[in-house]
Amino acid sequence: MNRLICILGPTATGKTSLASHLAALIGAEIISADSRQVYAGMDIGTGKDIGDYTVGGVEVPYHLIDIKEPGYEYNVFEYQNDFVKAYKKIIANEKIPILCGGSGMYLDSILRAYEMNKVPENKALRTELQQMPDKQLSDMLNGLQNLHNTSDTTSRARMIRAIEVAKANKANLDTMNLLKSLRSINFGILFDRQTIRERITERLVQRLENGMLDEIGHLLEKGVSKDELLFYGLEYKFLTRYVSGDISYDEMFDGLNTAIHQFAKRQMTWFRRMQKQGVRLNWIDGNLSMEEKISLILNVVSKVS
């Protein structure tokens, strides 16, 4: 039986630190569930807190962080497949996998084994296929699927899309089989509304003091466009507008602070919806000590195992 421990919660609840301390204790590796931490160089703004992965002077192995360059359009479909690769690697290392993060859709796609109805565009594959003659494309498609629909071969564009879909579906079959077999034990970190607001504001101040604005400047210098940074929202949206002179510092801080508070509320709404749809969550009081949180988790895990 495929086992998984999941630790989730809204932003600024200390998920990574808890997951890392637990991992260090039980010999586990962490799989990130954060839609923006996949991007290299986007560190402070996404709250990677890489230092949290070091416990007692030893770094806990982590996965699915810094795997793509800024500007790349990563998606849930790719995340599911990357999760399975990381999961299998951890199991092969005879370690315990811990899923940790706050991106509701990414978490949900694993815990409820989303079946994606629409295969996203694979730009790298399309570039490769564009170099091939029609006969080679047709032969490749014929080898990937039974041609129930002959219209797949009536044009290069149709053949390339059909190959793209067939390859994705073939790779995703293994992913779906594993996700559906997962038996996860899930924990959520919970603070009262006022406490989480205070934690969010304090964390924002710390990030700004630690160079979050400089990070925006470095990304722009590296060629990441203003529009691309605005697309990533929250910190990148407000800080880019400030750096570009569109808003004042006070407008940036107040607007961003409010936006993060609203984001945390949306995260909790998503987690509550997951519960209604069958995901069992064991909620942990965020005010407990690290030792108390870990003891609670181990107690629940021991009863389920």
Image (spheres, grey):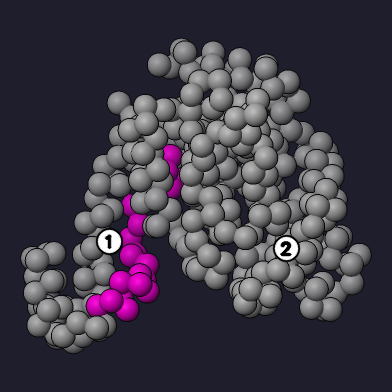
Disc on res. 168:
1
- In this rendering, the answer to whether 240 lies above or below 255 is below
- Disc 2 marks which residue? 215
Q: Comparing marks 2 and 1, which lies closer to the viewer?
A: 2
Kindly state the secondary structure of the residue where label 2 is placed: helix
The N terminus, quarter of image: top left
Q: Earlier in the sequence, mark 2 or mark 1?
A: 1
Q: Report the front residue among 134 and 55.
A: 55
Q: Quadrant of residue 113?
A: top left
Residue 121: x percent and y percent? 36, 71
Q: Report the front residue among 26 and 182.
A: 26
- In this rendering, the answer to whether 19 lies above or below 234 is above
Q: Give the residues drawn in magenta, as a range.
A: 108-129
Whether residue 285 appears in this view of the structure is yes
Disc on res. 74:
none
Q: Report the front residue among 111 and 228.
A: 228
Amino acid, disc 2: Glu
Kindly state the secondary structure of the residue where label 1 is placed: helix
